[in-house]
Amino acid sequence: MELKYRRGMTASILAGILIFVTAGAGQAGSLAGSEGDKRFPPALNGDPKSPCTKAYKAYVAASGHSAYATTPYSRVVSLYILCGARLNAPSQKVAEELAMKSCLATRAHYKVTNGGACEIAASK
């Protein structure tokens, strides 16, 4: 008689564990569509052909760890926006480091000396 109640209790416990495990697995899936940790809202000009708009949309659509770096926009100082992104990196930290390198390389390519430094705007 006692065995009968233990089977029911064991089945209930296993069912509860299964519910928690499957809920966690669903959340750990894809990061696609997520804006991740936004540190500041990136200034996008709204032009879908703009390289920074394309890079930010690709960042949001990326399914893995990614980061988007840009120069912060200030109407007084900056008349331009420079950016860099890294998509689907092995970790969030690596994505941030490579996005910063990309943004800094863009600054160096265009020989920008003023207007603000590159910063991570968002990462996931």
Image (tube, rainbow, N blue to C red):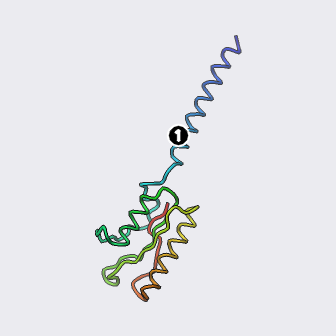
The kind of secondary structure element at disc 1 is helix
At 57% across and 66% down in the image, what residue appears? 93
Q: Which residue is mark 1?
A: 23
Percent position (x, y) of residue 76? 31, 83
Q: Quadrant of residue 89?
A: bottom right
Percent position (x, y) of residue 95? 54, 66
Percent position (x, y) of residue 50? 33, 72
Q: Residue furthest top?
A: 1
Percent position (x, y) of residue 120? 47, 70
At 34% across and 82% down in the image, what residue appears? 78
Amino acid at the residue labelled 1: Ala
At 55% across and 34% down in the image, what residue appears? 19
Q: Is residue 60 above or below residue 44?
A: above
Between 97 and 38, the residue placed more toward the observer is 97
Q: Quadrant of residue 79?
A: bottom left
Q: Residues within 10 Å of mark 1 (few under 14, many from 20)?
A: few
